[in-house]
Amino acid sequence: MSETRAGFAAIIGAPNAGKSTLVNALVGEKITIVTRKVQTTRFPVRGIAMEGDDQIVLVDTPGVFEPRRRLDRAMVKSAWTGADDADAIVHVVDAEARDLVERGRGGGAEKLSVKDDDSVTEGLKKADKTAILALNKIDAVERDRLLPITESLNATGVYSDVFMVSSTKGYGVADLKSKLASMMPEGPHLYPADQAADIPQRLLAAEITREQIYDRLHQELPYFTAVETESWRRLHDGSVRIEQRIFVERDSQRPIVLGKGGKTVKVIGSAARAAMEDAFDCKVHLFLQVQVQPGWDENRARYQAMGLDFDI
C-alpha cells in the first residue's frame, strides 16, 4: 500500500490577485473571505484540500504589499512566514492587471499590483526559494497575450512550474492541485479527511460578517473596521446565538455602518446570518453592535487572536 502524502502549501501574492478564491477552488468550498476589495485577508487561513489520499494544507496568506501601519506590517510578515514554513509556495499573479500595465492601459491599482508582484519575486530571490507561478484570471486576457506575460515572469528565474488558471471559472485548478499533492512529503494526514478548514468557528463567524461589511460599505471605511465574536452559545434546539461587535475608529464612521434607522447594519447582519447558516449547517441568531474604538488596530490581544505578531 502506497504512503499518503500531507504537507503545507503557501499561497502568496499581491492583494486582490485572487489568492482566496483560488484556495476556495482548490478546497472545493468557501473557507476564506473573498471580496472585490484588496487586502481583505488579514491572517493566515488554512484550507484543507484532498487529492485522492493525499492532503494539501493550503495557507491563504495576507497579500504582500507596501505596509503603512502596524497591521499592514504584521500582515506582510505573516505572509512571508507562511512561505518560509511551507513545503510548496504558489505565487498567484493577476494576469489581467499585468497585461493592462504592459500595454500601457493600467491605472493606479494595476500598477500597484505589478509592483507588489515584483516585490514578491525579489523576496523569493533573496530567500533563495522557488515557487509555482499561478497566472490567474486568464479568462480576462486575450490568449496571445498570455505567452509574453509568462515569459517575462519566467525570466526572473524563481519559478519551477507555471500554471495558467482562472480561480473563478475553474480552469487549470485541477492540474495545479495534482502538482501540489505530488510535492507534499510522505506522511499521515495532518487533519481529518473531511475537514475543510482549520479556523475556529468564532473567528470564521467574525470573518463572515467582515466580508459583508466589505461588500456593502464603500471606499476606505471597511479597512478601518474590525469584527469580534463576543458570545457563541449553542441553544437547546441546536441553533446558535452569536453576538458580535463591529469596531470603527471614529464617531463619524458609526452612523455609516448603522445606516439610516439601522438599515445598513440590518442588511449586513441578514446576509452574514445566511452565510453562517450555510457554513455551520444550523440556524443562527445573530446580534450585531457597532462601537467606536479609536486605535483598535493597536490592540495586542486582537493581533494574538488573529495569529499575527504585534511586536513588529
Image (spheres, rainbow, N blue to C red):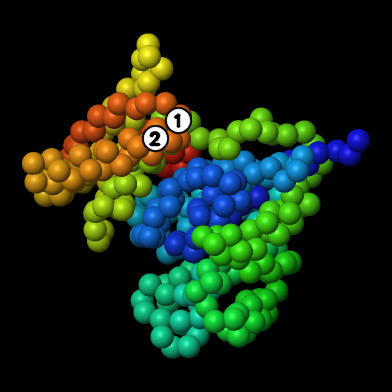
Work out whether residue 110 or residue 140 is closer to the camera in this orientation and state it.
140
Q: Mark 1 points at which residue?
A: 280
Q: Which amino acid does label 1 sit on?
A: Phe
Where is residue 28? Give x, y as percent. 58, 46
Going by the numbered disc 2, the residue's amino acid type is: Met
Q: Residue at x 56, y 65 (%)?
A: 166
Q: What element carries label 2?
A: helix
Question: Where on the picture, by quarter, is residue 245?
Answer: top left
| Relative side of 196 to 67, left or right | right
Badge 1 element: helix
Residue 96 vs residue 183, the one in the foreground: 96
* Residue at mark 2: 276
* Image position, residue 115 (x, y; %): 47, 73
The 10 Å Cα crowd at callout 1, few under 14, some 14 to 19, many 20 or more, is some
Marks 1 and 2, how far apart at CA: 6 Å
Quarter of the N terminus within the rendering: top right
Q: Which residue lies furthest to the left in this view?
A: 261
The answer to whether residue 51 is seen in the rendering is: yes
Placement of 217 over or under 162, stated as above or below: above
